[in-house]
Image (tube, helix red, strand yellow):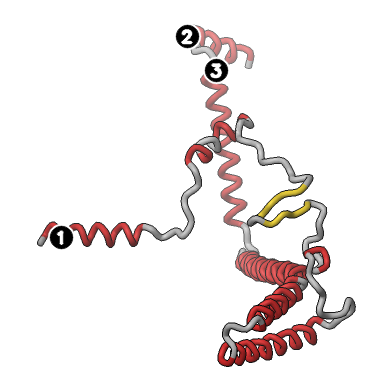
Amino acid sequence: MSRINNTVKSIKMSETQQVSAFPLPPMQYINHYTDENVKRGKIPQPPPLIQDNYTMFGVPFNADDAIIRPLESQGLRRLYPQNYDHKRELKKLNHSILVNFLDLIDILIKMPDSSKRTEKLEDMNLLFIHMHHLINEFRPHQARETLRVMLEIQKKQRHEIVEKFQKHLETVTELIQKSLVAIPDDLSFDSKALVQTELLKVKAEVEDTEMDIEPCDQLDRMMCDIVDSMSK
């Protein structure tokens, strides 16, 4: 019984550890990006830009193609005019899809083996392609709006930082003003302290000079005193 419980616990732990939905990058590729290789410039170079045709999800693409290719280049028949209103055309396509779906249900009920079922599926497929194409044409507008919102958020954050700095500056300025007001006008104590420090400095200099003089002999000092008294 204990063995079964341990097995169940190990399974639960393995399930909880598998959080990421994507596999880890290959270690043989990550090991090239060490700090030493980055400093020496030995990291693998990025792949070159695609200049010609390429295939993505089994669909061929050309590097010079527009981001949103027109329907005619994909071999599809356009169901709306060249100059159109996106909102109006999307509503019309949505209504057409609903009508065709009801027609498809009616065909499946009455004539499930009829060729009209395949035709109706192709019509609905074409309608969905047109709807997705119109939605994709809003991608550049979505990218611009996303960038605009990001810039507005950054602008707001910077304004908030500036306001905080301004408040801190005002607080510091107020503290300095209060400190200046609190300084006493009578500085006699400070002047006395300065005089004492000057006297201490002079005394220290005198002591230094006295220590620099060589010591005098007692007989020499007596002779000097006798000469001084005779000169007087």
Q: Residue at x 74, y 72 (%)?
A: 133
Return the residue nearer the eye: 222 or 229. 222
Q: Residue at x 51, y 20 (%)?
A: 211
Residue that carries the numbered disc 3 in the rendered image: 212
In the image, residue 171 lies at what x, y percent?
63, 69
Quarter of the picture holding the N terminus: bottom left
Q: Amino acid at mark 2?
A: Asp
Return the residue nearer the eye: 176 or 34. 34
State the image quarter where residue 124 is shown: bottom right
Circle 1 crowding by C-alpha within 10 Å: few under 14, some 14–19, many from 20: few
Vertical relation: 123 (above or below) 53? below
The first of marks 1 and 2 along the sequence is 1
How far is disc 1 from disc 3 in space, using C-alphas? 95 Å
How far is disc 1 from disc 2 in space, using C-alphas? 106 Å
Q: Residue at x 88, y 76 (%)?
A: 82
Q: Amino acid at mark 3?
A: Asp
State the image quarter where residue 104 is shown: bottom right
Q: Residue at x 71, y 72 (%)?
A: 149
- Using the image, tell me which numbered label, if any, was put on residue 217: 2
Does dot 2 land on a helix, a strand or a loop?
Answer: loop
Disc 1 and disc 3 in contact, CB within 8 angstroms:
no
Q: Is residue 65 left or right of residue 106?
A: right
In the image, residue 117 lies at what x, y percent?
63, 82
Q: Nearer the viewer, mark 1 or mark 3?
A: 1
Q: Is residue 88 left or right of residue 208?
A: right
The first of marks 1 and 3 along the sequence is 1
Residue that carries the numbered disc 1 in the rendered image: 4
Circle 2 crowding by C-alpha within 10 Å: few under 14, some 14–19, many from 20: few
The first of marks 3 and 2 along the sequence is 3
Does dot 1 land on a helix, a strand or a loop?
Answer: helix
Does dot 3 land on a helix, a strand or a loop?
Answer: helix
